[in-house]
Image: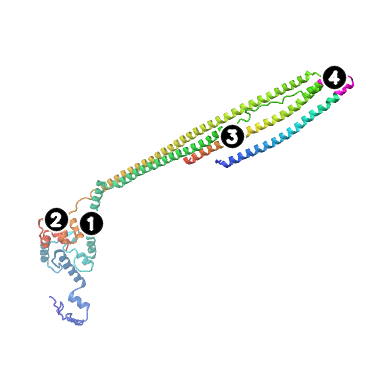
């Protein structure tokens, strides 16, 4: 194949188009996912807040909690409640963090692949020029 | 009896038959063959007489009719002109009357016959032709010898040899021109290819240097810190629950471990990207070096091919020239051999002409007697430049006879 710059430029444009399109699509997906995650985290917090008063009231009705009353059962229930809230909130947050991190990682992978493809393209071009130069030399030598 | 303008030889009156002409005799009677024969003899007799008179007049400038003469008159005539009472003869021909045979052949009386007359003519012609042939052979032999000895015949071979020299010089020059042109083309092709290859790989190196991007460089994962979200709620009811804070700390520790794994992976990928970039740079350098080495090797191979082709062409040319020289030398030797053989085969043709052959030759070739005597006896003519024709004829009677 004789060296044709147009072919390499066509390949370069194809890589750039694909890189841009997939980047935009992933950015939008990440945005949607973050939005959905933030809403879920908010719902989780609100749910725990709503459970606080019923929890205290249930121990008050049984006389396990009240002015000057601090039962072990109430304390343990409160501690468990706090631990559950902390763990579930952490799990939810971690899920969001990992999702964002996966998005960033994918972006870097796409960037690496894109740069690698461009470098390969340049390498192929140089190699093609080398082969064509050799062919031209053969023609000049009449071989 | 001599005839005058008014009478014929018989003394008869002649009358002119044309107006204004009165000197012709008037015919007194019709022509009668019988009477004519009795008066003048036969036609053969007249031919014989005419032949004698004409021949002796031509030979000796002294007309003589042998038929009408007595033996004494014949002997006297022969002594006078031939120094012998009998007329000399050449071969079977009587020289006193070489035309006798011819006269007889034509029907005249006398001693000759028609056959001997023709034979005489043939003999004379053959003699003359033989002499001329001998002269030709002499000339041919001399020309052949001159041609061989002067070496003119070698000129053709010298010219052909010179042409072979020119062909060799020209052919060698053309082969060298082709070789030099091939070297120039190879050199120009190498220069172009080397420049193009350099440009291609320089562009690659430049691109790699300018686009030394590492997507993983600086990448790190910092997890969100987990807070104790129920602390206010606990304090409001006077509950002291360190387990909740402990849970948050545990979650944060867990997140940190996960983030550390991510960051380790990023660091690994970053270093891999750097190595990949370096690998590309090295690859480009190696490829460029390899391409240059390949071009140099290819150029050397092409130059070797051109040199080999030149050597083969020169060898082929020299072989052909040598072969042609050998053939030419062989042909020259054969030509010399042929000429030598021809000279040997014609040896003897250079024998000098006899006196009689010289006379015959001069009679055939010289325009007149004086020219002939100048060639026949140049020394005598030099000593006697004022000799008269008569004196010369007397001095050289045989040559004189040939011109009668």
Q: Secondary structure at mark 1?
A: helix
Q: Is residue A45 above or below residue B366?
A: above
Question: On the same chain: label 1 and label 2?
Answer: yes
Q: Residue B157 location, x and y as percent?
A: 31, 45
Whether residue B88 is visible to the viewer of this picture, yes or no, is no
B402 versus B221 height, above or below: below
Q: Nearer the viewer, mark 4 or mark 2?
A: 4
At horizontal 67% and vertical 36% (from top left) the residue drawn is A23
Residue interval drawn in magenta: A56-79
The quarter of the picture where the C terminus of chain B appears is: bottom left
**Residue annotated with mark 3:** A119
Question: How many other residues sit within 10 Å of disc 2, few (<14), some (14-19) or many (≥20)?
Answer: few
Q: Which mark is residue B378?
A: 2
Q: Which mark is residue A74?
A: 4
Whole-number angstrom distance, CA of label 2 to CA of label 3: 115 Å
Contact between marks 1 and 4 (CB within 8 A): the answer is no
Residue under numbered circle 1: B132
Q: How far apart are the alpha carbons under marks 1 and 3? A: 107 Å
Q: Are marks 2 and 3 on the same chain?
A: no
Number of labelled discs? 4
Categorize mark 4 by other alpha carbons within 10 Å: few (<14), some (14-19), many (20+): many
Measured in 3D between alpha carbons, the distance from the residue under mark 1 to the one under mark 2, in whole angstroms, is 21 Å
């Amino acid at each position: 194949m004789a060296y044709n710059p147009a072919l390499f430029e066509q390949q370069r444009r194809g890589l750039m188009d694909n890189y841009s399109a997939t980047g935009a699509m992933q950015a939008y997906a990440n945005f949607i996912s973050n939005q959905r995650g933030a809403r879920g985290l908010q719902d989780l917090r609100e749910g725990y807040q709503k459970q606080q008063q019923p929890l205290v009231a249930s121990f008050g009705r049984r006389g396990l909690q009240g002015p000057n009353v601090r039962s072990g059962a109430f304390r343990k229930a409160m501690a468990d409640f706090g631990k559950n809230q902390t763990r579930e909130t952490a799990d939810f947050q971690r899920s969001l963090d990992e999702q964002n991190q996966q998005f960033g990682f994918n972006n870097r992978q796409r960037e690496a692949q894109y740069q690698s493809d461009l470098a390969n393209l340049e390498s192929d071009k140089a190699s093609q020029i080398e082969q064509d130069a050799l062919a031209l030399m053969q023609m000049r030598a009449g071989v | 009896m001599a005839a005058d303008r008014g009478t014929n030889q018989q003394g008869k009156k002649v009358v002119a038959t044309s107006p204004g002409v009165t000197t012709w005799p008037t015919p007194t009677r019709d022509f009668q063959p019988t009477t004519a024969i009795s008066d003048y003899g036969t036609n053969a007799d007249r031919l014989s007489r005419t032949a004698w008179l004409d021949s002796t007049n031509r030979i000796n400038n002294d007309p003589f009719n042998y038929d009408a003469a007595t033996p004494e008159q014949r002997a006297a005539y022969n002594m006078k002109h031939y120094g012998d009472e009998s007329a000399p003869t050449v071969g079977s021909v009587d020289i006193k009357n070489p035309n006798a045979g011819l006269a007889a052949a034509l029907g005249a009386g006398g001693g000759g016959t028609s056959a001997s007359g023709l034979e005489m003519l043939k003999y004379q012609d053959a003699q003359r032709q033989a002499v001329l042939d001998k002269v030709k052979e002499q000339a041919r032999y001399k020309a052949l010898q001159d041609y061989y000895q002067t070496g003119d015949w070698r000129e053709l071979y010298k010219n052909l040899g010179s042409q072979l020299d020119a062909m060799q010089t020209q052919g060698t020059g053309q082969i060298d021109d082709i070789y030099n042109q091939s070297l120039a083309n190879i050199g120009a092709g190498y220069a172009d290819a080397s420049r193009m290859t350099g440009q291609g790989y320089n562009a690659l190196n430049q691109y790699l240097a300018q686009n030394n991007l590492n997507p993983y460089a600086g990448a790190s994962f910092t997890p969100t810190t987990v807070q104790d979200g129920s602390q206010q709620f606990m304090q409001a009811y006077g509950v002291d629950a360190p387990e909740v804070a402990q849970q948050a700390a545990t979650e944060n520790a867990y997140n940190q471990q996960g983030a550390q794994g991510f960051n380790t992976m990023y660091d690994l990928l970053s270093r891999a990207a750097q190595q990949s970039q370096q690998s590309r740079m090295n690859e480009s350098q190696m490829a460029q070096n390899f391409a240059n080495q390949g071009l140099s090797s290819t150029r050397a191979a092409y130059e070797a091919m051109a040199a080999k082709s030149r050597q083969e062409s020169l060898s082929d040319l020299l072989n052909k020239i040598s072969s042609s020289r050998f053939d030419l030398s062989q042909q020259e030797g054969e030509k010399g051999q042929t000429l030598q053989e021809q000279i040997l085969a014609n040896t003897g043709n250079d024998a000098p002409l006899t006196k009689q052959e010289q006379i015959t030759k001069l009679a055939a070739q010289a325009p007149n007697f004086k020219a002939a005597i100048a060639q026949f006896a140049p020394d005598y003519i030099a000593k006697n430049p004022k000799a008269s024709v008569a004196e010369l004829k007397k001095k050289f009677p045989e040559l004189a006879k040939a011109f009668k």
